[in-house]
Amino acid sequence: MSREERLRLRRAERAVDRMHGMGRKVFLAIRVDEQSYLQIAERFDISVADVERHFASSLRILMQAMDEKDPWWWKFWPW
């Protein structure tokens, strides 16, 4: 693994460390455990819309940590 790849991996790890509560649980369930939104909603007793909201906020934390711009669709996200 190159130095740049190691740095990107470390930034991603720090971003996951900064995620809190349900956002972190949802992110890890989707990306690590490869569960569907429905499975996660049932597992944590929340709605699928809540899963989407938590995942979107987690992705934003990750993108900011990776020095990437917010995607164009972010401004349309219904908070």
Image (cartoon, rainbow, N blue to C red):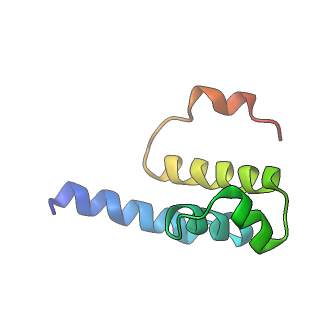
Residue 22 sits in which quadrant?
A: bottom right
Query: In the rendering, at what x and y percent does residue 78 appear?
Result: 82, 36
Is residue 9 placed above or below 62 in the rendered structure?
below
The quadrant in which the N terminus is found is bottom left
Is residue 44 placed above or below 2 in the rendered structure?
below
Is residue 48 placed above or below 29 in the rendered structure?
above
Query: In the rendering, at what x and y percent does residue 35 appear?
Result: 60, 64
Residue sitting nearer the eye, 1 or 49? 49
Question: Is residue 51 found left or right of 5 in the rendered image?
Answer: right
Query: Residue at point 62% right, 66% down?
Result: 19
The quadrant in which the C terminus is found is top right
Query: In the rendering, at what x and y percent does residue 46 appear?
Result: 84, 64
Question: Is residue 68 found left or right of 57 in the rendered image?
Answer: left
Query: Residue at point 70% right, 65% down?
Result: 39
Residue 5 sits in which quadrant?
A: bottom left
Query: In the rendering, at what x and y percent does residue 15 appear?
Result: 51, 62
Residue 8 sits in which quadrant?
A: bottom left
Is residue 60 placed above or below 47 in the rendered structure?
above
Residue sitting nearer the eye, 49 or 10? 49
